[in-house]
Image (cartoon, rainbow, N blue to C red):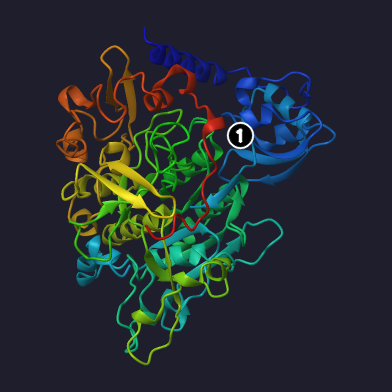
Amino acid sequence: MSCIHRRLLLALASVFLSLTPGTLVADDKKPDDKKTDDKKLSEEVKNLPQLATTDVVVQFQLGGDASKLQKALGPGSKFKKQFKHFDGVVITGPAAELKGLSNLGFVKFISTDRKLNGSLEYAEPTTYANIAYQYGYKGAGIGVAVIDSGVNNHGDLRNGDASRIVYSESFVPGDPGAADAYGHGTHVAGIVAGDAKLSSGESMTRKFLGIAPRANIINLRVLDANGVGTDSAVIAAIDRAIDLRGQYNIRVINMSLGRRVIESFTLDPLCQAAERAWKAGIVVVAAAGNIGRDRSMGTDGYGTVASPGNSPYVITVGAMRDRSSVTRSDDRLASYSSKGPTLIDHVVKPDLVAPGDRIVSALASGSTLEMRYQSRVVQQNYYKSGGKGTGPYFKLSGTSMAAPMVAGAAALLLQKDPSLTPDTVKARLMKTASKYGMPSASSYYHEASNTTYNVQYDIFAVGAGYLDVWAALNTYDTVPAGYRALSPKALYNPVTKTVTLLSTNVIWGDNVIWGDTLLWGANVIWGDCVLLANNVLWGSNVIWGDSLAAGFNVIWSDNVIWGDVSVFPEALSAEGEGDQ
């Protein structure tokens, strides 16, 4: 039996035991703060000094609830936040007491309340959204929740005199205002739903139109003026989106933010909250992350997808450079775009790619980003002679800009057919993503660092391909009842030195709807060296060469299969990598 199969059996046994009746601790039983169940503690919690006071997210097992935990708290601990749709709470207290909670049978996992960051002119025709507009598909009536740094009442986010920002709320501790002090969320919202009103006058030479220019925006602010937030703020925002789903027809959540992967998506509180939204009928779109250039692990940028983009439920988006043209033939993968497979679980990510480099969208006037990067405010060459020198638009790069392209596309699909499930939306976007026109490899010279970055266009770099909105609107495949559009896992066979897909109860298995070749292309993906025989993704000489190569071992070796997070850097700031 292989080590992978042994671990899988142990994991299944652990899940079975945790659900066995009779394991819950009596409501009035106090945990022993000198004893802990380390399997239920994240690495950061394990390493906390016993007297340190901190905030933690405590997740419940099936049958657990807040009242049971309330009775079990030590004298120095107290509830800080409770959620309605997420099975957990935020508690503050001394580490010794918090660690002791792991002994309670109904507690699933305890992690610190982690910090996270936020991670058109040509992009709209490049994705073929312009064709959709001609047929009346503009996202009308669809609510898109933008979980970000806030959204300002920009002129492109209105419908006549009425704002299309139909709801706003802040989850930033101590800051009740939902305005965009950082400048990231307004830009993201403009990509989703900007109608180009402020760039449609006679003074401007170009129009900056979003993907779903009639969609409504639900503004859920979680990032502060420096673009920083916490797990608990994002979870609370997702919780609210689920709550408001019926009132504002929230069908899509966009999260252009993230942090490093620290544990399996089955325990990660961000992933668990995103999964809950997905199962509530909301399409969840997440940025892949902006650290595809990171070489600290020796993987040439592989294994760098951020959370919650590591969840197999969500649609995770990487970034392309449209190179200021409306054609795809010269487009290239942005060198900073994070690549899969995901750490720990080895989920195949990203799911697809979309334009994300030098994207012009709505500016939040007076924001931190505007003050920090004055040169990225739209300048004189976008205006006709006599026009003003700067305007209400801003240029940013990153997978943070690519994700709302896909969120807007999802809104168009849902306007056309409101009955679509999140799984069908994901499946249609991935199946129809363009699998042609990209090279098998490319390189990019980054002048600032004097470094050349090489990119191979494989399944862990570009996923199922390049977003094609019009093609997605013209496919009618649906996900059968009982199936999920989960991103599959990749399994390495140390004997044959090959990597294969593991598809369990997903629509792109061998006999369900369409096979792997339709989803990812005949060569999975286009690279000359990539194999497909017997569903094989990689041979022994692809990407990392022999299995003893350092990069290969980081992703697949036993030592880090559950994640050696000490070598994984923090996520970069929301503005991405600048002009690439």
Quarter of the rendering containing residue 187: bottom left
- Tell me the quarter of the image containing the C terminus: bottom left
At 60% from the left and 21% from the top, the residue drawn is: 39
Q: Is residue 510 left or right of residue 52?
A: left
What is the count of numbered marks?
Answer: 1
Q: Where is residue 17 in the image (x, y as percent from the top left)?
A: 54, 16
**Residue type indicated by callout 1:** Gln
Q: Position of residue 122 (x, y in %)?
A: 28, 67
Q: Is residue 232 left or right of residue 309?
A: right
Q: Where is residue 555 in the image (x, y as percent from the top left)?
A: 41, 27
For disc 1, the marked residue is: 59
Task: Depth check: give the residue in front, 554 or 112.
Answer: 554
Task: Depth check: give the residue in front, 311 or 547.
Answer: 547
Task: Depth check: give the residue in front, 63 or 465.
Answer: 465
Element assignment for label 1: strand
At 48% from the left and 41% from the top, the residue drawn is: 307
Please say whether residue 515 is visible from this viewpoint: no
Q: Among all residues in the image, which is located at the extreme top?
A: 1
At 48% from the left and 52% from the top, the residue drawn is: 119
Does 322 appear above or below 110? below
Task: Depth check: give the residue in front, 182 or 55.
Answer: 182
Q: Among all residues in the image, which is located at the extreme front?
A: 450
Q: Position of residue 194 (x, y in %)?
A: 38, 71
- Tell me the quarter of the image containing the N terminus: top left
Mark 1 neighbour class, 10 Å CA radius: few under 14, some 14 to 19, many 20 or more? many
Does 372 appear above or below 1? below
Q: In this view, does 111 lie to the left or right of 324?
A: right
